[in-house]
């Protein structure tokens, strides 16, 4: 039994957690050692270490650590660990941030993953699943809630979604076997195969070459850019076509047509209606206009602003947290980093809202004049720079950690 222990392990140890009866927090640090805090039993194995926790567990590990967890009875948060990761059962919520390859068996709460550099293999998620910025493939067996996925640089394979399935900006193929509600697809570059959606399917923007098949019990709404080629086959009781299709053949309950000459084949089958629309308003005076032209009128890119803010502030958080850890230990460093993280999330969310407003104006000739921001109350002008100043004062010994905490809370 121990409350805190440091184990010299090298750069890539193997850690196995058999059981954790409380919450689990694992993060990487720059040391070639593992720091364990909590009430636990530790055993050294031939190829690593095994431990069981009675209550909450906190681990600081080298970034290349291989982690295997059997049962986590509370919430689990794992960040900036790029070694192989496996979790059998998480009875609470699961958050993965900046990880490598991961295999998850069952999450009984909600699950979120962001900034992953390896493939994600997820089993049963009994809550909602939110996946963003994955630089590899994603496979999910079952999501009992809603599925929200964005910015995936690989293939996506989903078995069953009990709620809505929303997929935006996927570079590879997308397959959804069954969705009990709606499926919303945007900017998918690989082949799409939606076997059965109990609700509606909405497809926005063009698709890459290959064969695409979408089937829904409800309606299918397609917004297609008329500059992109398509070979279209549609089957539904009612079909509303507003696309400039050529070689058009319409019969009772079916439509065949195409735009241009290309290898993009789309097959639609709906129990309700199929509605085909142009992705943007066509008007002669806009000839030569491209959607990207609008973004060029700004000195920065709305689409990536949230990510840029997050990256810059997280860089400062990591640097300062490392310095604080050396001076005051991991607990105080985590406390300060958590305060910064809340500011980062708010900044990123604000940037994403700005991006959405910009997209809504893409079909206008010029962007609307900027609205002046409402002045913030004098007591609420909290910035990352101010927080960094407070942390540097702690580092220099000008104020105590407790005084720094009170100052940060007052600023917020």
Image (cartoon, rainbow, N blue to C red):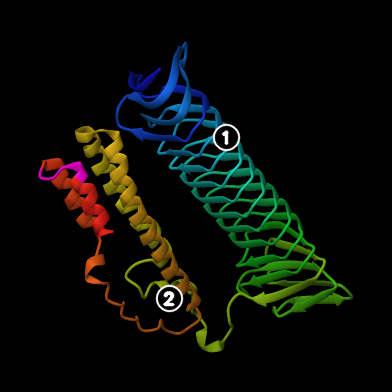
Name above or below for residue 333 compared with residue 30.
below
- Quarter of image, res 70: top right
Q: Quadrant of the C terminus?
A: bottom left
Q: Quadrant of the N terminus?
A: top left
From the viewer's perspective, tell me whether residue 359 is left or right of residue 268: left
Residue underneath mark 1: 103
Q: Residue at x 40, y 67 (%)?
A: 302
Q: Residue 338's x, y, as percent?
A: 34, 47
Q: Residue 317's x, y, as percent?
A: 29, 46
From the viewer's perspective, tell me whether residue 389 is left or right of residue 137: left
Name above or below for residue 380 compared with residue 308.
below
Describe the element under mark 1 as helix, strand or loop. strand
Q: Crowding near pointer 1: few (<14 within 10 Å), some, many (20+)? A: some
Residue underneath mark 2: 294
Q: Crowding near pointer 2: few (<14 within 10 Å), some, many (20+)? A: some
Residue most extreme to the bottom:
285
Nearer to us in this view, 49 or 192:
49
Magenta segment range?
398-402
Residue 152 located within the stretch drawn in magenta: no
């Amino acid at each position: 039994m121990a409350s805190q222990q440091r184990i010299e392990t090298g750069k890539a140890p193997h850690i196995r957690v058999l059981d954790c009866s409380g919450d689990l927090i694992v993060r990487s640090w720059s040391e070639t050692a593992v720091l364990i805090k909590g009430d636990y039993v530790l055993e050294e194995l031939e190829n690593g270490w095994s431990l069981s926790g009675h209550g909450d567990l906190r681990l600081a590990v080298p970034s290349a650590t291989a982690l295997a967890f059997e049962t986590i009875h509370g919430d689990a948060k794992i960040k900036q660990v790029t070694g192989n990761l496996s979790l059998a059962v998480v009875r609470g919520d699961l958050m993965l941030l900046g990880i490598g390859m991961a295999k998850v068996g069952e999450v009984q709460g909600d699950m979120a993953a962001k900034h992953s550099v390896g493939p994600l293999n997820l089993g049963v998620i009994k809550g909602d699943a939110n996946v963003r910025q994955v630089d590899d493939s994603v496979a999910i067996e079952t999501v009992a809630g809603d599925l929200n996925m964005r910015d995936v640089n690989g293939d996506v394979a989903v078995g069953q979604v009990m709620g809505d399935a929303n997929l935006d900006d996927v570079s590879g193929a997308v397959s959804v076997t069954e969705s009990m509600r709606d499926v919303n697809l945007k900017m998918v570059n690989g082949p799409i195969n939606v076997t059965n959606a109990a609700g509606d399917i909405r497809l926005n923007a063009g698709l890459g070459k290959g064969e695409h098949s979408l089937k829904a019990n409800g309606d299918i709404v397609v917004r297609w850019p008329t500059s992109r080629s398509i070979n279209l086959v549609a089957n539904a009781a009612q079909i509303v076509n507003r696309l400039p299709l050529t070689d058009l053949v319409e019969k009772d309950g079916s439509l065949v047509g195409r735009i241009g000459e290309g290898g993009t084949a789309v097959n639609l089958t709906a129990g309700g209606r199929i509605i085909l629309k142009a992705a943007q308003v066509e008007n002669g005076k806009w000839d030569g206009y491209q959607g990207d032209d609008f973004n060029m009128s700004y000195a920065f890119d709305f689409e990536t602003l949230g990510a840029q803010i997050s990256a810059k502030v997280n860089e400062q958080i990591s640097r300062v947290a490392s310095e604080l850890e050396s001076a005051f230990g991991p607990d105080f460093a985590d406390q300060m980093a958590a305060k910064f993280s809340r500011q980062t999330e708010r900044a990123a969310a604000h940037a994403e809202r700005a991006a959405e407003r910009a997209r809504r104006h893409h079909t206008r000739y010029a962007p609307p004049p900027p609205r002046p921001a409402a002045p913030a109350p004098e007591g609420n002008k909290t910035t990352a720079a101010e927080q960094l100043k407070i942390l540097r004062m702690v580092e220099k010994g000008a104020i105590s950690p407790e005084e720094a905490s009170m100052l940060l809370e007052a600023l917020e």
